């Protein structure tokens, strides 16, 4: 009986694996498209930092981490601190 069930389980696992691979490829493509839409100009980054802070209540380091996830790597934690101070937060 095991000789009959084992191939069926392998088939189901393979189907699931292929579906997961396709889903991961789709999400990677979607992520790349969204990163291209993220603002790169200083004023837009400043507005983005303030919007994230206003909507989430997160601190400097957490906001910096989220910016890095979005592909904005050209600012440091002190820049986020300075944006907060200039905005009066």
Image (spheres, rainbow, N blue to C red):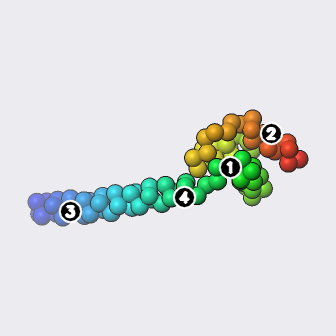
Q: Residue drawn at (38%, 57%), measured in percent from left and top? A: 25
Is 81 above or below relative to 17?
Answer: above
**Mark-to-mark CA distance, 1 and 3:** 50 Å
Camera-near label (1 vs 4) is: 1
Which numbered marker is on residue 13?
Answer: none
Give the labeled residue for mark 2: 82
**Mark-to-mark CA distance, 1 and 2:** 16 Å
Residue positioned most to the front: 41
Q: How busy is the neighbourhood of tag 4: few (under 14 within 10 Å), some, or many (20 plus)?
A: few
Q: Nearer the viewer, residue 89 or 72?
A: 72
Measured as percent of width and height from the top left, residue 23 is found at: 39, 61
**Mark-to-mark CA distance, 2 and 3:** 56 Å
Which numbered marker is on residue 11?
Answer: 3
Of the numbered discs 2 and 3, the one sitting upstream in the chain is 3
Badge 2 marks a residue whose secondary structure is helix
Give the labeled residue for mark 1: 41
Q: Nearer the viewer, residue 16 or 72?
A: 72
Camera-near label (1 vs 3) is: 1
Of the numbered discs 4 and 3, the one sitting upstream in the chain is 3
């Amino acid at each position: 009986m095991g000789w009959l069930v084992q191939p069926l389980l392998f088939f189901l696992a393979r189907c699931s694996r292929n579906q997961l691979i396709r889903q991961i490829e789709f999400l990677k493509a979607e992520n790349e498209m969204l990163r291209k839409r993220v603002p790169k100009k200083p004023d837009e980054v400043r507005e983005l930092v303030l919007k994230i802070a206003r909507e989430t209540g997160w601190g400097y380091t957490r906001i910096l981490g989220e910016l890095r996830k979005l592909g904005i790597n050209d600012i440091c934690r002190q820049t986020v601190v300075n944006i907060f101070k200039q905005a009066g937060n």
